[in-house]
Amino acid sequence: MATKEKDYYGTLGVKKTATADEIRKAFRKLARKHHPDVNPGDKKSEEKFKEISEANDVLSDDKKRKIYDQLGFYSDNIDPAAAEAAARGGYAGGGFGGAQRAGRGGQEVPFDFGGFDFSGFQGNSRAAQQESAGFGGSFKDVFSGMFGGGGRQARGPQPGTDLEYQVQVDFWTAIRGGVTRLEIQRQEQCPTCKGRAVVGGSMECPECHGSGQVTQMGGRMKFNIQCPRCGGSGKVQNACPTCDGAGVLTRKEPLEFRIKPGTRDGQRIRLAGKGNAGTEGAPAGDLYLIIKVGPHKLFQRVGDDIHVRVPVTVMEAALGAKIEVPTIDGDNAGAGHTQLKIPPGTQTGQKLRMREKGVPSATREGVRGDQIVEVQVVVPKVQDERSKEILRELQKLNPDDPRAEMLAGV
């Protein structure tokens, strides 16, 4: 019977005292290196990715990690309470309550429960009424609780996983909407096995040699558990030669989708069923597109509002005027423009609001943002004497010191 020993800490390259953050960082580093999307067609990387994923699944879960640390291995069939009882009974130290010591010199002898028949603890037999000193219950109670009775764990249909891509969209497409294209890499159902991962008839399982069980090591203990490869049936089928038993094939696929008017930067768009394919008829995952909107040289978008800085002359700011300002209401080629009234005495940095001149909302029909115009007063470079004379006269007529209030409070 095959023996399986797995060092999850060694697989991730961390110490047994590693924190959850250290485990997470180690997994991410290895996942980026061995992910199938990064190494298409590389079976070694694919197997390595499966190993580190399995190790991370156990060590990143506090309950699973505790069971693994207590017993030296992990199975979904193990009951946490029974594992705790086993640890309290002395198992974690290599045996049960010191009962493992035997022979001359008190040498430790590892237990091997392989092939042990627990049926003697059933019924009204005397053995059924005896309790193990280390556990406070019968051996059958403990082991049936730990391994849940050992029913077959068939692979069964596996839903497809979700995919996520970042999509670059230009400023105008995000505002006005349009069609965007990109190429994605996704898993499709294998056409040969139809996602079943196997072809042909069954044969003896090479993992357990037809017994349906393998021996799992835990310190100096051995436990017979259900074979993970055949699910306890003792038989397996030939892996599909087209997909190498994966049930899916990785393909690059062009994708075309429509951007709604008013789509925002960072918005997440879900395309149902466009993720990785499932196996054995299970549904495919979803595709999530994260929108990244490009900038514009004039306009800055904040939510559904458009911000723009517009220069005005000293005279326009002082006396008031009607000026032309750019807006997003242009043709498909770019911006448009409209008139804006500058009130007399407008100061630089002052913001004027143009109602409903912003971006149409992508979520609320008929709602539109505003355009915020920030005024920038441009001071002219005076060179001729006549202009200087006029400005000196203007200064005499308006002798107010704009810094007086500020200096008064110092």
Image: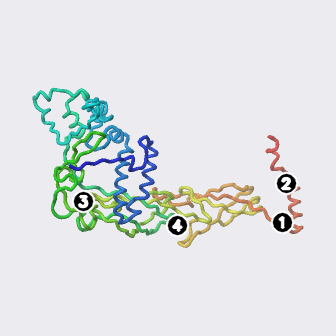
Q: Are marks 1 and 4 in contact (CB under 8 Å)?
A: no
Write down the quadrant of residue 253 in the picture: bottom left
How far apart marks 2 and 4 lie (CA) works out to 49 Å
Q: Earlier in the sequence, mark 3 or mark 4?
A: 4
Dot 3: element? loop
Q: Is 107 placed left or right of 373 in the picture?
A: left
Along the polypeptide, which appears first: circle 1 or circle 3?
3
Q: Residues within 10 Å of mark 3 (few under 14, many from 20)?
A: some
Q: Tell me whether circle 2 and circle 4 mark residues in contact (CB < 8 Å).
A: no
Give the residue type at disc 1: Val
The residue depicted at 86 percent of the width and 52 percent of the height is 399
The mark closer to the camera, 2 or 4, is 4
Name the amino acid type tagged 2. Answer: Asn
Eyeballing the image, is 95 above or below 276?
above
Mark 3 lies on residue: 281
Amino acid of disc 4: Asp
First-in-chain label (1 vs 4):
4
Count the numbered circles shown.
Answer: 4
Determine crowd level at label 4: few under 14, some 14-19, many 20+ residues with C-alpha closer than 10 A: some
First along the sequence among labels 1 and 2: 1
- From the image, tell me which residue sits under label 4: 170
Q: Earlier in the sequence, mark 3 or mark 2?
A: 3
* Depicted 409 relative to depicted 281: above or below: above
- Residue found at the far front of this picture: 104
Image colouring:
rainbow
N-terminal of the pair, mark 2 or mark 4, is 4
x 44%, y 42%: residue: 18
Say above or below: 75 vs 332: above
Q: Nearer the viewer, mark 1 or mark 4?
A: 4
Residue, disc 1: 382
Q: CA distance from mark 1 to mark 4?
A: 41 Å
